[in-house]
Structure formats: C-alpha cells, structure tokens
Amino acid sequence: MSGYFGAGTWAPESELEIIMSDMPSCQFESRPRRIVIGSGGVQADFCTNCSVRPTSVCSVIEPSDISRLAEVAVETIVSPGRGFIEEGAPATDFFNVTSGTVKLFKALPDGRRQITGFAAPGHFLGLAVSDSYAFGAEAIDTVRVCRFSREKMGELLDDFPKLERRLLEEASNELVAAQNQMLLLGRKTARERVASFLLDQMQAGLLPGQPPPSGGRLHLPMTRGDIADYLGLTIETVSRTLSWMRGQGMIEVGKGYAITIVSMAKLEVLAAGNG
Amino acid sequence: MSGYFGAGTWAPESELEIIMSDMPSCQFESRPRRIVIGSGGVQADFCTNCSVRPTSVCSVIEPSDISRLAEVAVETIVSPGRGFIEEGAPATDFFNVTSGTVKLFKALPDGRRQITGFAAPGHFLGLAVSDSYAFGAEAIDTVRVCRFSREKMGELLDDFPKLERRLLEEASNELVAAQNQMLLLGRKTARERVASFLLDQMQAGLLPGQPPPSGGRLHLPMTRGDIADYLGLTIETVSRTLSWMRGQGMIEVGKGYAITIVSMAKLEVLAAGNG
DNA sequence: CTGATGGGTTGATGTAAATCAATGCAGCCA
DNA sequence: TGGCTGCATTGATTTACATCAACCCATCAG
C-alpha cells in the first residue's frame, strides 16, 4: 500500500505489526521481533473507532484532525510474556495501550525486580525526557498498543497544544500514583500492601474502558510473582497474606486469577494502616 | 488570621510574606501563619535577578515577558520546620523553591511517614491535577518559595506554551526519580538504600544552583529521621548503616550535618546492588 | 500414560531490620 | 548553673518477612 490517506510519502506506518512470543520465556527478553502481518493499511476510522480514545490522551484531538493521528500511529500486538520496552534502550517510541495489561518494571543487576505499575487500556507509556527508557515494559496477557515515534509525537505536540496539556495531566496523575506507591513500599506492612493493592485494582476496574467488576469480583491478569514484585514482597508472603485474608472472611480466592472481595470495609481499614 | 493562601479577594500579591515558626514544633503543623512584612511590591527585576531562574521552569519565559511573571509571583519565606502545603488540603497554589530545602511527604493516620522527595532550589511544586494536594511540604531549613495561584498559573500556561512543555519535562523527570525510589524502597537493602541516597545527594549537589560539594564533602540539611522516612528505614538503622560505612572507609561522618564521601567507588558498588 | 514445567500453597527455619532501651551531647532558657 | 529538649549513637532483644523446602495441581509434549 502506498499513499494511503494521500498524505504519507512512504508506507510502513499504519500496518499491523506483531511482537511474537517465539521463545517460551527467557530471563531477559531480547529486542522484540517485529513482524508485519498486514499491509492493507489502516482505515480512516482507525482512531475514530478506537475503544480507548475517549479515555486516552488521544481524546483531545478533534474528530476533524483524527486523520493526523492515524497517520503516525502503528498498531502493534504483543503476545503474553513478551517485552516491548527494554530498560536502558534508546527511547525511540511512545505507546498507548489499547487492550490487555502491561507491567512496567525496573531491575537490579542481580535480577531483583520492582514493578512500578500496571498499564491498562488507555494508559500512555514512555513519558521520559531522557534519551533512553527508564523502565522496561512487558505484556502480561495479549496486548495491543499504538506506537508513535518520538519524532512524529513531537510534531503532534507542536500542532496540538491541547495534547501537551493532556500529557501533563497524565504525568501528574502518574506522579500521584507513584507517591502513593512510595508510601506503600516504604511504610506499609505486608497485609496493608495487599489490601491496598486489591482496592486499587477494584478502583481501576471501575474506571471506564474495562468491564466493571460486579459483586466485588476481580480478574487479576498478573501472577503472584508480579504482585509480589509490585508490592515489594515475595511470592510466598503474597500467597500467605491472601490466605490469611480468606480466613478473615475478607476475600474469596478462586481458581486461576479470580479474587472476590467479600468485605470492602475490612480491606479499607487494613489499607488505611490499621491492622 | 484567616484565608490561608489568600482566597484572592485581597491585595497581598507581590508582597513579601513570611510563614513564621511561632510554635517550636507540634505533631501536626497547623496552618502556616502568614505575615506580610513588606508592601512596596516587587521590583521589575524581581524575576530577572532570580538566582534559580536559569534552572527553573521560569527560564522558558523570555526576558521581555518577565514582568508578566513578576506580576503573579509572590515571594514567601518559610522558617525551618514549618509546613506550607498540607496533604489533602485544597490545592490552590503552585510553588517554585528559590532557596533552602523542602521535604515532601505522605502520612498514614497513625503517624507513619514517607518522604517522597526533597525539593532543592529550582524545584517546582504542586503538579497534581487533583483539587487537593496529594502530599505535604515542610521547610527543612529556611526556605524561600515563589507562590503562584492556580488561576494565575493557568493564564500563564495559556500565554506561554513553552511553559507547558517545560512543566511536562519537569514532571517526567520526577516520574523517573519516583520510579528509582520505588526500586529502592521495594527491593534494596538498608546499605544499598543509604549508599544510593548519598550518591544521589552528591549528584544533586553537582547540578547548577547549589555550591558544588568539593572533595566529596556533603552538607545534608535533613535529620537522620528525615533520611529514615525517605529511605523507608528507622533512625537507628540509618545511624548504624552510616557507622558501618565509616568503619568500611567509605565515608567520614562529621559533626552536625556534614558527611564526606571517601570512596565513591565502594558506594557505587553498594548502590548498584552488590553488597 | 508419563514426565516435565510453571504457578500456587503451606510449613520450618533464618535473618535483616524494627523495636526497646540506655547514653551522650549540643543548644536553649529560666 | 541546671534542667530540658531534640538529635544522634550504640547495644540487646524481638519480629515480620525472606528463605529454603516440600508438595499440589494444571497444562502440555511425547
């Protein structure tokens, strides 16, 4: 395809690329393998029909200017367990998660990991002035992201001042979340951490974009290991704490990734620091 | 006195106000007492001659537009130990630190505290989209800040797009710092934390604005308690760890707030996670 | 079917850091 | 001068959590 939208001089933008999981799992993911599987090009309504547009930074672009957005966005599919941002690598792109869940993390040389956040659909990734990524990103389940090159993103920012304000808003929100997480990591007990986590996940599910968790039913896509790395605990402590909460009648732990919150009140008391 | 942070109907913009330490110290600082001591107004070169302008967000305002800045800025002096942002209070103002050091923190109901950062001259405070402050701020030594009302700041942002980009940059940098701190709090040992802290302080001192620490000499304005609350440790552990480092020939601990870094290399090995 | 693998739970033991406690020292004020 | 307070250091003891280890249960490949 060429000259799609009559705008671009070259083609590969707006194709669908897939980052495959061609190896079961390795300690440090190599650079994502990029496979372009479609070349029909993206429709004019690519962004218009985007399910996360109302809640993402893209919402500030007027419908009349949507084509500008679709021009520079490359939709990418990342399979579960696959990394697509490598900590320390040159920061060439920004991403917008459109479906699935991403874990963001930093690591120490000996392998210790801290997950700094989970990015749900609508989340914007890559905010860092530095020329290299300050964190890594890996798909938890099957993830779709929109990729913007740094260069193209700069042009968008120049042309749409509203976008800049929206990004500042996004960054501020993340900053608040980061401060909450620092309080959690530095001063909360294991039980308080897990309680806070469950309530946060509940809260996140209530936001637009994802199916709302009815009846306190949560579907956590991440493993116990991920939760542990997020809360600064070990797998065993997370598991034991969940069992303890079950024993206290706070939650029910289902098969797989299901957890049901039975007593929000009890969890809130815990999370606030009483217990 | 009433009208904490001026509701806006009265005049004191561009006067010099002082937040006094009229009580020695209480568990939770009451609202700062605001005392206007000058009323001559700020000179036209108020901002032009500002020592932190080159390194702060204000640097993006052209000299020709500086008067706009001086119009909306209120210089405020905060005495040591005095709070000037209360966590949870309505977020009415933004601040720019011009001298001294500020500690930013979050607290749990039972008094546990996490210091989320130390703000040195040039640092911009108050980035949060929420209508209330997500953190508290307290002067460590004598602090001077420039205060901007939310409203006036909005006007500045409308008039100077560059300011918005600079704020985004500022927020991104803070985000990176926050992620580093999460790694520290979640996964580093006490020794690694203290080592990281000393190196960060060294780094911060090398940036423009403050007198560069020559010969590895650091002057830390904060108490052991502040360091502990920043690193997610106790006072005793911080003290013991510093003593241990002294024993290892890594540092020298002087009287008061002086610490000299003897072997940066050893500290770096520690901070990176080998030790 | 069998064995391997990854995730999860639970138990026994170890330990890093918290807590409890005593002491020293400087600044401050009556 | 003496008493008070805040900050710091160091020692003794406790503890929350990590570590080590066993086990269960899916899933999947041969």
Image (tube, coloured by chain):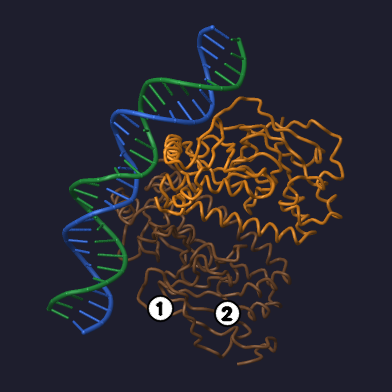
Chain colours: A brown, B orange, C green, D blue
Q: Identify the chain of the residue marked 1, using the numbered disc in the image.
A: A
Whichever of callouts 2 and 1 sits on the residue coming sooner in the sequence is: 1
Is A212 rendered above or below residue C22? below
Question: How many numbered marks, from 0 up?
Answer: 2
Q: Are marks 2 and 1 in contact (CB under 8 Å)?
A: no
Looking at the rendered image, the quarter that the N terminus of chain B falls into is top right
Where residue B105 is drawn, which disc sits there? Answer: none
Residue designated by label 2: A74
Observer-nearest of B100 and A197: B100
Q: Amino acid at mark 2?
A: Val
Q: Which residue is mark 1?
A: A21
Which of the two marks, 2 or 1, is nearer to us in this view?
A: 1
Mark 2 on the same chain as mark 1: yes
State the SS at label 2. Answer: strand
In space, the residues marked 2 and 1 are separated at their CA atoms by 19 Å
Q: Position of residue B258 (x, y in %)?
A: 56, 35
Badge 2: chain ID: A
Q: Secondary structure at mark 1?
A: loop
> Quarter of the image holding residue C15?
top left
* Residue at the image point whose x is 50% and y is 70% from the top: A85
Say which of C24 and B70 sits in front.
C24
Horizontal and vertical percent position of residue C17? 39, 41
The crowd level at tag 2 (other Cα within 10 Å; few <14, some 14-19, many 20+) is: many
Which of these two is toward me, A76 or A215?
A76
Q: Return the x and y of residue A177 as percentages of the image width and height.
A: 53, 54
Q: Is residue A176 left or right of residue A67?
A: left
Residue drawn at x 84%, y 54% is: B63
Q: Residues within 10 Å of mark 1 (few under 14, many from 20)?
A: some
Q: Quadrant of residue D26?
A: bottom left
Residue occupying image coordinates x 75% and y 31%: B35
Disc 1 marks a residue whose amino acid type is Ser
